Image: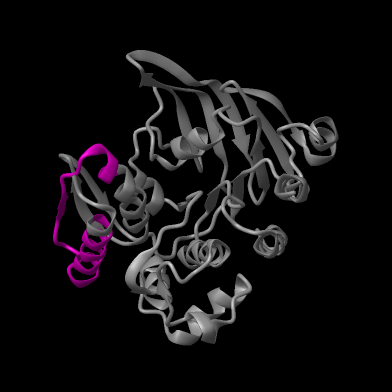
Amino acid sequence: MMSGNAAHFYLSTLILLVLNNKNMPIYCRLRFQQKFLLCNNIITLLILRGQRVIIDNVITMSESSGSHERGSIMLELKNISFSAESDGKNVEIIRDISLTVEDDKFVVITGPNGGGKSTLAKLIAGIEKNTAGSFILDGEDITGKSITERAKMGIGFAFQQPVRFKGMTVVDLLRIAAGKNLSVSEACEYLSEVGLCAKDYIDREINASLSGGELKRIEIATVLARNVKLALFDEPEAGIDLWSFNNLIRIFEKMRSECKGRSIVVISHQERILNIADEIIVIADGRIAKQGSRDEILPEITGTESAVNICHKMA
């Protein structure tokens, strides 16, 4: 079995191969633990740049989305269900969910832990495949589309735990995300948008020297650089301190005020994130329990597991 250090070195080598040869396939045959360790990193890279990667005979083709035309967007989920094997049994995780995300809206999906929130986000992005139902984006059925195809259509996904790429600088990652050779000044603009002092970060390696909050903001900068139509954030508050969380709130408030041409979906049960939402959707036991405007839903769930105050949580 590959050690953690060996796996990290292996991933760094893969990244350098990707950067040096866009058309070269990469073969990754790993045992389960290593595949899980590297999979999020590789998926993120696939979304950011065109590459052919084979992981245990599963072939994924990816291209950078680059710029795309803006238009009226509407994400619609029709009777989405998802089941997975657990201890030899088929467990239904998402149960017949139907909902819409309207144009230029900031939507927060919340609910008790284990209710299916993060799974639903991964289904929308194409990381997991639904067992029933359909997804419609901009009037087009994308149910059969891969994660790569959905990324090209303008769906961006930010993981709970942002990835670290040893040997890659922040400016390198932003250039990959944008799909073009950004100038340093252009890259600095994206960092400034997320509240980072560009001169302090532009040449930093994306490694363990960066805090969780710094990584979160850099990941959001890559989403902005990709110019996505639908941005999905899976529990962005995970693993960061209160100071970083306050910065994250400011970034989301700015994104919400400037969200023309982009819809934002955040998976979170933090009350301050819920307070930014145009619409709140509560998922429990794989089903929609409540859905409506912030003014309608937030008073009903405040003080419950679906709306947690981060200060209380850290106390």
Q: Position of residue 61 (x, y in %)?
A: 24, 50
Please give left or right for residue 158 compared with residue 313 in the image: left
Q: Is residue 140 visible?
A: no
Magenta segment boundaries in residue numbering: 7-35
Reply yes or no: does residue 91 show up in magenta: no
Along the line of sight, the residue nearer the viewer: 135 or 40: 40
Query: As displayed, is residue 107 above or below residue 210?
Result: above
Along the line of sight, the residue nearer the viewer: 162 or 276: 162
Q: Most extreme residue toward the top, as rendered?
A: 89
Q: Residue at x 71, y 34 (%)?
A: 306
Please give left or right for residue 232 compared with residue 126 in the image: right
Q: Position of residue 311 (x, y in %)?
A: 76, 51
Q: Is residue 192 visible?
A: yes
Q: Position of residue 16 (x, y in %)?
A: 23, 69
Query: As displayed, is residue 307 above or below residue 181?
Result: above
Q: Position of residue 245 (x, y in %)?
A: 67, 59
Q: How many marks?
A: 0
Reply yes or no: does residue 17 show up in magenta: yes
Please give left or right for residue 294 compared with residue 80 in the image: right
Q: Residue at x 84, y 39 (%)?
A: 295
**What kind of secondary structure does the magenta stretch mostly adopt?**
helix
Q: Residue at x 56, y 34 (%)?
A: 117
Q: Quadrant of residue 258?
A: bottom right
**Colour scheme in the image?**
one colour
Quadrant that contains the N terminus: top left
Q: Residue at x 50, y 86 (%)?
A: 185
Query: As displayed, is residue 43 above or below residue 120?
Result: below
